[in-house]
Image (cartoon, rainbow, N blue to C red):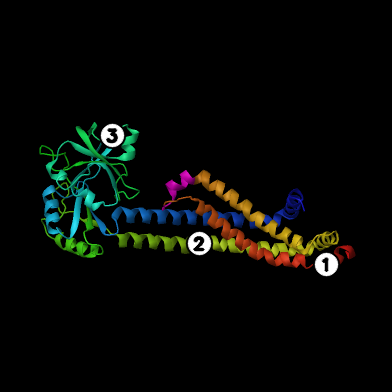
Amino acid sequence: MSGRALAGDIWEGWRGHPGRLLPVFVALLGGMTALMVMWAALEALRAEAVQLEAGLGADGFLVEALGDGAGWSVEQVEGIRDVLAGQAVVCAISDEIERDGGFRVAGIVGDLTGARTGWKWTGRAPDAVDGMRGGSLCWLERGAAARAGIQVGDVVAVGGRACAVAGLYETGGAWIPGMSADVAFVPGGAGRGGRGTAVPKLQRLLIRAMVAGEVEAAEVRLREELTGPWSRPLDAHGQEAACAWLTPEMVLGEVRHWQRTVRWGGGLAAGLALGLAAITLACLQLLGVRERRTEIGLRRALGATKGEVAGLFLVESVGLALVAAAIAGGGLLLAAPWLARVMPLPLRFTWGAWAGPLGMAVGLVGVCAAIPARAAAAIEPATGVRE
């Protein structure tokens, strides 16, 4: 049978009972849409977990001061570094304090290269001394510098002052959680009027255990120290502020919670819709086999094999699922910007988000359609001649 003839037979099969197929098609469309959205949410959660875990590092964690203007002073950071000396590397980072010359700017105190071992540096990397001695230096993200035509050694306006570009960095996708991927770092050695760049408060403590597997010990030690008044972050009014902790275990636990919620909630709804549609389609196909006994018998009498007859019913069912998948996928592509604004979870439409639901739907419909296909193939050629 030629492809054109097969397409004509499929169309005749669909057109023969539009009232029956329309509810099934709507159910397939809804199930495919829900499954694609669920898959895209799982893809986004997985990517977010990978990025956050990479941003923290296998032996790192992040402590962030909460509240408007809350953070640690340089003296407090130095005290925390002394407490964790020999156990963990500490780098304090300010919020992105201004945008100057096209760069988002953040101050650093401590050993950034020790806290971010996975980054690649061109030129001179910042060390623990840079954060204290200040100076007119800055470190730019390689991509941002390339877009601006800036190289190591150039002098640029960053943070309201002229700074020499001491080096460039590449995060490899492992940027610091809660911060821009292309932030410009400047030494944050003092507040306004003192040495260094003007950084009144340092809002984040990025910490990495020096010994692999000792991150929990460093975390426990820091939690103990942050209970003291000397080490607590202060808000803009000088009052003690709360802290938020971000560890790899917390990140993975939160992501796994949402993954379970999406799988059970979205997966159940999508699976129910697809399952009901597939079963209903199989029942309608069985009814169609009975109504088309004469046609099927004549096909057999004219030389159609059992496989060709069974294949016709399988292709009719699977084709309906493919059409529903195409419409669902195209609609989601068009609606992606709107969904990004209204959905409580991020969405990431990768090839897997299309292929996975499509494979599941086609497989489910194909399995259910095998029953009417076998029933059609069992009709003998003499049936069409007698009837």
Residue 140 occupies quadrant = top left
User: Residue at left 37%, top 55%?
Assistant: 50
Dominant SS in magenta = helix
Magenta residues, start to end: 336-345
Disc number for residue 304: none
1 vs 3, front mark: 3
- Above/below status of 163 relative to 121: above
Disc number for residue 380: 1
193 lies left or right of 96: left
Are circles 1 and 3 on residues that touch, CB within 8 Å? no
Residue 159 appears in the picture as rendered? no
Frontmost residue, 329 versus 5: 5
Label 3 sits on a secondary structure element that is loop
Q: Give the x, y percent position of residue 193.
A: 10, 37
Q: Give the x, y percent position of residue 127.
A: 18, 46
Q: Give the x, y percent position of residue 279.
A: 64, 65
Quadrant including the C terminus: bottom right
Are circles 2 and 3 on residues that touch, CB within 8 Å? no
Q: Residues within 10 Å of mark 3 (few under 14, many from 20)?
A: some
User: Residue at left 21%, top 45%?
Assistant: 94
Give the residue furthest to the right. 386
Among the two numbered marks 2 and 3 on one chain, the one whose residue lies closer to the N terminus: 3
2 vs 3, front mark: 3
Q: Give the x, y percent position of residue 101.
A: 27, 32
Residue 20 occupies quadrant = bottom right
Disc number for residue 151: 3
Q: Does the magenta stretch include residue 211?
A: no
Please state which amino acid type lies under the numbered disc 3. Answer: Gln
